[in-house]
Image (cartoon, rainbow, N blue to C red):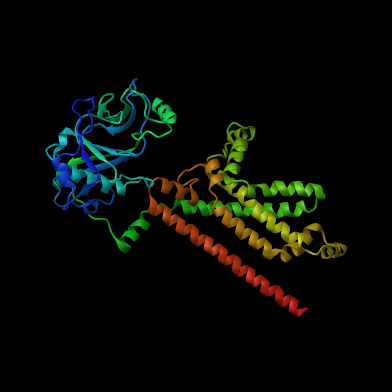
């Protein structure tokens, strides 16, 4: 198979030059070898089986991130925790190549000297990794693959350790510079990269683990397809982001409606110079990036502020709680309601309002019996637009409320984190939900605008 390059380490901790592919590996690159599509992966993505393979794959897992901390008081490199046993096959993925390790315990099933066995192992890794949550980063068969059955292996000055025991019964996969230096962005190799103006190709991206087992130990049922797959997907879906979003948006729109009308009404009753300042203050959340709004709210309501500490003392902490999602939605969507309401009030005939006052109407009666009915079409449009803006709020909510499933995780936040976790299907589902809501909002605005236009034309024709 193209890109497959078996290689061996002669001694633990001493890495030889990577040899060229032996004859068996060259034969594996010819015709007759199948791709990873011939591997059947279990629905949960932890097992795989292929017809004709001398072994199967079990207990697959992916370590997306490692740790650079000391283990038991000593630095062993950038480490990925393997578990309580060192008998897993391992694939360390970098930007330029993949280092695959075959444990000695698996030799009866997967011989390091057999190009055919290595090809099957590679196919298992590729198939299982493609089904794992991966945020779009997967193993590639287009880069060189180096295979070894030794506990350490070196490529380009970087030593990969396998089954490294650190502590009683704890094993790690380690990545370390040949000189004992750190390979991560915080280490000496990063300084070397900056000096050379390039990235170190051996920096690990992630590590895959699987157990090599006899084929009869694995029974893989193919995942459901078609409507059965859709039904399974909908049945297992976590719908809490929908309920959190609707609860947050429904609560926020009440505050937005009241505060927007009040701000629009009172901003027109203050002196002109003060109106300009008030208008800028009320409108500025609309032009600021949502993350800036969230950051400012965090500075205002955080635990280190007097206001935030007061809410904590009274038993009502705001940040990283559900009320924080409402506050974030209100702040970013309020300007839409305010601008629409103020524009509608400014368009009213002042002579008509003065005539109402001469008839003895109070300001409250003028507002509720005259201003609101005459401005209702613009107010309704502002309400719907504010609802849509609150529905799609992401940046300020994430800053102020965080990402807590069932509490503060709204649909936009769920889309982002599901995509980051590699759950593309779930992210697409919530994207479709948001698109449907947006379509309904736009359709409502268009229908309302057309109805209002017909009503006004009829009034003009009656005159």
Measuring from the top left, give residue 75's x and y in whole percent. Answer: 34, 22
On screen, 417 above or below 373? above
**Which residue sits furthest bottom?**
462
Measuring from the top left, give residue 133's x and y in whole percent. Answer: 35, 46
Foreground of the two, 95 or 175: 95
On screen, 63 above or below 368? above
In the rendered image, the quadrant that contains the C terminus is bottom right
Residue for point 22% across, 48% down: 48
**Which residue sits furthest right?**
358
Residue for point 53% across, 60% down: 438
Asked where in the image residue 229 lies, by quadrant, the reply is bottom left
Measuring from the top left, give residue 352's x and y in whole percent. Answer: 82, 65
Q: Is residue 255 visible?
A: no
Residue 390 in the figure: left or right of residue 78: right
Asked where in the image residue 295 lies, by quadrant, the reply is top right
Foreground of the two, 265 or 46: 46
Residue 343 in the figure: left or right of residue 358: left
């Amino acid at each position: 198979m193209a890109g497959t390059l078996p290689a061996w380490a002669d001694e633990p901790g001493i890495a030889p030059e990577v040899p060229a592919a032996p004859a068996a590996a060259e034969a594996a690159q010819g015709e007759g070898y199948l791709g990873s599509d011939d591997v059947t992966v279990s629905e949960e993505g932890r097992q795989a089986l292929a017809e004709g393979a001398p072994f199967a794959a079990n207990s697959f897992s992916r370590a997306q991130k490692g740790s650079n901390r000391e283990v038991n008081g000593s630095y062993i490199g950038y480490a990925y925790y393997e578990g309580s046993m060192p008998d897993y096959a391992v694939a360390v993925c970098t930007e330029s190549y993949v280092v695959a390790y075959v444990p000695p315990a698996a030799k009866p099933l997967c011989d390091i000297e057999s190009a055919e066995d290595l090809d099957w192992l590679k196919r298992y890794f590729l198939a299982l990794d493609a089904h794992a949550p991966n945020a779009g980063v997967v193993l590639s068969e287009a880069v060189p693959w180096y295979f070894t059955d030794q506990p350490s292996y070196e490529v380009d000055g970087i030593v990969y350790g396998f089954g490294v025991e650190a502590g009683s019964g704890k094993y790690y996969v380690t990545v370390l510079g040949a000189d004992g230096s750190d390979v991560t962005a915080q280490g000496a190799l990063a300084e070397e990269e900056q000096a050379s103006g390039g990235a170190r190709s051996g920096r690990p991206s992630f590590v895959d683990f699987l157990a090599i087992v006899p084929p009869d130990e694995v029974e893989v049922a193919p995942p459901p397809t078609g409507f059965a797959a859709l039904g399974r997907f909908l049945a297992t879906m976590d719908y809490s982001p929908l309920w959190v979003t609707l609860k947050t948006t429904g609560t926020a729109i009440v505050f937005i409606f009241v505060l927007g009308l009040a701000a629009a009404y009172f901003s027109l009753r203050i002196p002109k110079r003060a109106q300009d300042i008030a208008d800028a203050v009320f409108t500025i959340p609309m032009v600021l990036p949502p993350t800036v709004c969230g950051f400012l709210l965090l500075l205002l309501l955080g635990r280190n502020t007097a206001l935030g500490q007061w809410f904590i003392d009274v038993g009502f902490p705001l940040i990283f709680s559900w009320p924080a999602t409402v506050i974030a939605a209100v702040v970013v969507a309020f300007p839409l309601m305010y601008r629409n309401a103020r524009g509608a009030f400014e368009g009213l005939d002042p002579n008509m309002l003065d005539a109402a006052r001469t008839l003895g109407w109070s300001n409250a009666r003028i507002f509720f019996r005259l201003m609101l009915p005459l401005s209702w079409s613009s107010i309704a449009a502002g309400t719907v637009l504010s609802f849509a803006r609150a529905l799609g709020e992401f940046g300020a909510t994430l800053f102020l409320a965080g990402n807590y499933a069932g509490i503060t995780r709204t649909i936009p936040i769920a889309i982002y984190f599901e995509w980051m976790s590699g759950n593309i299907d779930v992210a697409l589902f919530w994207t479709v939900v948001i698109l449907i809501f947006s379509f309904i909002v736009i359709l409502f605005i268009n229908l309302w605008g057309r109805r209002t236009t017909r009503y006004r034309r009829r009034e003009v024709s009656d005159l």
